[in-house]
Image (cartoon, grey):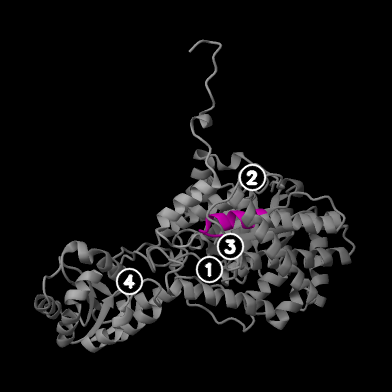
Amino acid sequence: MAATEQAAPFIDTFAPGADEQWRQRVEVALKGAPLQKLVARTYDGFDIQPLYARATGKPRAFRAEREWAVSARVDHPEADAANALALTDLENGANGLHLAFVGSVGAYGFGLPDAAALAPALANVHLDAGLRLVLDLPAEADAFIAAWLDLVAARNYDPAKIDVSFGLDPIGASIVQGEVVDWEVAGPKLAQQAALLASKGFTSDLVAADGRVVHAAGGSPAQELAFAVASGVAYLRALEAAGVDLDDARKMIEFRLAADADEFLTLAKFRALRRLWAGIESACGLEAAPLRLHGETAWRMMTRRDPWVNLLRSTVAVFSAGLGGANSICVLPFTQALGLPDAFARRLARNTQAVLLEESNLGKVADPAAGSGGVEALTDALVERGYALFQEIEQAGGLARVLESGVFQAEVAKIAIERLKNVARRKEPLTGASEFPDIHEKPVSVLKPAPAAVALGAKALAPHRLSEPFETLRDRAEAAEQRPAIFLANLGPVAAFTSRATFAKNFFEAGGIEALGNDGFADATALAEAYQASGAKLAVLCSSDAVYAEQGLDAAKALASVGGRIYLAGRPGEMEAQWREAGVADFIHVGGDLLTQLSEALSA
């Protein structure tokens, strides 16, 4: 090529595609099914389309720093042990610490016990060396303020050199325990606490408007956003009522959100919060400024079974929160649901972020999703829905009053129940729990086993994990004197039964019932003999519709003659009465209530 010649842009190699062309090809691929089949519906009531055009003219969701801080979780109940773990984290890639105390929003079974643990947990930690410190405190925070100020004074720190999010959150920390604050008392007290810290030189990130409590209770993204913004407004009003200038008051408020494995909704949620709060600032007569936003990988998505999959979920969550504009992120170690994570689990939690930051360079661009049609559309929808819910809270008298009435908790519960129904039917699959379970998984180590759940107040936004119902079934199966088993009654050639046999294996092993596989049988007699020889008390007939039509009823009768409970893999259609007359007790298929059917199988 001559020096004066210029290569044509690579994009010119391909002819531009039109929306209509795409639709025509999709219609062919769908084989007559409507295009609506590709449209997803969110729990907040808006649609997610399969294709979006490029978005232009949208506001960017800038964060204050270019890279987020890698915050290591500190929750060991023994302060000296917590300190040793924290120092290891800081020596190996973390540049932040997230201290979770018992009774706080982020205490998932464990936590530092009390204010007396603050100083020893931070022994030999140089708080003025650029470290980001996030405190997760219970509702009653006076003792923690005193302990913090004593620590700062004892070490002769310059407050201006300490980057700390103090986390005063009386509303969130109370409701997670089922208690509702008396805002007439709690509001002025919060302002007094903030004033005390400000008088000592701590003037920013004193108060936490925390939406994680809603996410952990099963709420929707818009509900989480509305709760966080309503908290922020309540705290802003309390500070202003105490004489704090609005511009100073907003700097005292930091936000916290949960990040889960729904990549695009998480990314959009973090972006939406910045736009929502910018709107609040404008309504207050302030020029919008970047807020401080701390993200934590979601408790709700963690599983006890096949916990290694939690590493993948957390990676997606960090990716989404980081690109969505989080200033700091804490990754729950992959064994958090099993117990107190050890050094290995903590190392993986750190390195999840280190790879994304240091090797993938995800923190180098501010708001990289800007202009993406899909992300912008989701952000717009969450801003609109989140603000509408926030307005409902305000019209009802503010967040504290709405929580006192129980209305907000009831709305969160509706979403949580709907979500759990979808989990039960695998419309919302959980890899390793409801999908592709490993019933012979090897145990992983933890420092301490998870404590038993404690009873919470009736009005609590109680945290739970989506996989808990499946874990209960697995526990039932393993508590039996002998693990329950189901015989895969594979009928016909391999090509005929493989698909449904695989489905049945995953179906029953999600409840801890071992599937006994084989290479298939040519006739009903051989099938029944193999079932009897297996010793199983359950059997599931697996084959194609064509084989069912020719041999299915005879095979079902032969299996039923052996005894036990007989299932059919597939929908019964118009032959349900005939199948049941032949001895089939139940039918397993996509969309069935997995939890109910597995519970019945374990009771058979």
Q: Is mark 1 on a helix, strand or loop?
A: loop
| Residue designated by label 2 | 371
Q: Picture quarter containing residue 368?
A: top right
Q: Is residue 417 magenta?
A: no
User: Disc 2 to disc 3, how far (Cα)?
Assistant: 19 Å
Which label's residue is closer to the chain start, 4 or 2? 2
Disc 3: CA contacts within 10 A as few (<14), some (14-19) or many (>=20): some
Tell me where the magenta segment starts and ends, as one range: 259-271
| Mark nearer the viewer, 3 or 4 | 3
Q: Name the residue under label 3.
A: 47
Residue situated in front as seen by the camera: 404 or 272: 272
Front tag of 2 and 3: 3
Ranked by sequence position, the earlier of labels 1 and 4 is 1
As drawn, the label of residue 333 is none
Are the residues flagged by discs 2 and 3 in contact, CB closer than 8 Å? Answer: no
Tell me which corner region of the image, top left, top right, bottom left or bottom right, holds residue 431: bottom left
The type of residue carrying mark 4 is Phe
- Residue 331 in percent (x, y) is at 53, 56
For discs 1 and 3, the disc positioned in front in the rendered view = 3
Q: Which of marks 1 and 4 is in front?
A: 4
Estimate the spatial distance between the alpha carbons at disc 1 and disc 4, rounded to whole Å: 33 Å
User: What residue is drawn where x is 47% and y is 57%?
Assistant: 313
The residue to which callout 4 is attached is 507
